[in-house]
């Protein structure tokens, strides 16, 4: 599995490009002026601008330059915010949205469609599973209670679609494993039994806080097979650094 989701790879490349362009322009301007307007060793520089200590040299004021220096970065920030909105909206799409469909019926598949240019994943339907966080481990449930706020199905997911096991993970010891199927989308309903936790799915580059007494959700669109770690990214006590799990995706 990839460490970073294609959904954010596209956005990352755009941010890196603009960072390089702004950095080259800004530091290029800085270094040019630092060397072009310096006196040589032993030379006493003249006060060519008639500068007076404590007095702003108004004759050097350039309103057009100041406006451009303010407006152009502001427009860049608006543009970067705009291109960031689409992937974030896709991550937090509501159940029943056009991109996710409704909860799958018995025997129905999500039939995920992956768009390489944007990293978006559209699904015909989704499966509901649960995650519970507590100090200091995760527990999964493939068949949460029916007729709940998030699920109305009256059947159990097959072991092919969802199964829970455990395995040794180097550096973390024995950890739970959630086995899912590629090509399917899952709505993960989460809750904490004690303090705030935050599962970070490395393969999807997404995380969400898990709160005590409050259910939160996260989309898990599975597109590639392989194993990936789930870590806790909200400090939750002594063994926070060892709170992990594995998501294993099979074909």
Image (tube, grey):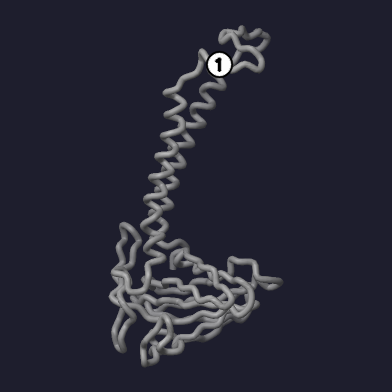
Q: Is residue 95 above or below residue 140?
A: above
**Rendered-image quadrant of the C terminus:** bottom left
Q: Which quadrant of the structure image shows residue 74?
A: top left
Judging depth in this view, the residue of 113 and 174 nearest the camera is 113
x, y percentage for residue 13? 41, 50
x, y percentage for residue 108? 29, 84
Residue furthest right in the image: 238
Taking the image as shown, residue 170 lies to the left or right of residue 249, namely right
- Tell me the SS state at disc 1: loop
Residue at image position (60%, 66%) is 234
**Rendered-image quadrant of the N terminus:** bottom left
Residue at image position (32%, 70%) is 97
Q: Which quadrant of the structure image shows residue 104?
A: bottom left
x, y percentage for residue 168? 59, 80
Residue furthest bottom in the image: 155
Taking the image as shown, residue 223 lies to the left or right of residue 240, namely left
Residue at image position (56%, 15%) is 57
- Number of numbered tags placed on the structure image: 1
Q: Which quadrant of the structure image shows residue 145?
A: bottom left
Taking the image as shown, residue 176 lies to the left or right of residue 181, namely right
Taking the image as shown, residue 88 lies to the left or right of residue 230, namely left
x, y percentage for residue 242? 64, 73
Q: Which residue is mark 1?
A: 37
Residue at image position (37%, 86%) is 152
- How packed mark 1 is, by other alpha carbons closer than 10 Å (few <14, some 14-19, many 20 or more), is few
Q: Is residue 174 above or below residue 33?
A: below
Q: Is residue 94 above or below residue 16?
A: below
């Amino acid at each position: 599995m990839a460490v970073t989701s294609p959904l954010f790879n596209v956005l990352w490349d755009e941010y890196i490009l603009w960072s390089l362009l702004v950095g080259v322009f800004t530091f290029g301007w800085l270094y040019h002026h630092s060397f072009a307007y310096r006196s040589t060793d032993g030379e006493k520089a003249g006060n060519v601008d008639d500068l007076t200590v404590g007095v702003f040299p108004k004759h050097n004021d350039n309103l057009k330059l100041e406006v451009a220096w303010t407006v152009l970065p502001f427009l860049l920030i608006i543009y970067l915010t705009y291109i960031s909105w689409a992937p974030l909206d896709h991550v937090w799409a509501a159940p029943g949205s056009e991109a996710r469909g409704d909860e799958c019926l018995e025997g129905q598949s999500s039939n995920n469609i992956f768009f390489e240019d944007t990293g978006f994943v559209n699904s015909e339907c989704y499966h509901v599973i649960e995650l519970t966080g507590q100090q200091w481990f995760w527990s999964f449930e493939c068949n949460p209670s029916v007729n709940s706020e998030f699920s109305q199905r009256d059947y159990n997911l097959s072991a092919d679609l969802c199964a829970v096991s455990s395995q040794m993970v180097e550096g973390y010891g024995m950890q739970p494993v959630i086995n899912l199927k590629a090509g399917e989308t899952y709505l993960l309903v989460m809750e904490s039994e004690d303090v705030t936790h935050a599962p970070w799915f490395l393969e999807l580059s997404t995380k969400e806080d898990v709160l005590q007494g409050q259910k939160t959700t996260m989309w898990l669109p599975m597109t590639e097979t392989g194993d990936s770690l789930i870590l806790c990214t909200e400090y939750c006590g002594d063994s926070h650094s060892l709170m992990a799990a594995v998501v294993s995706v099979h074909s």
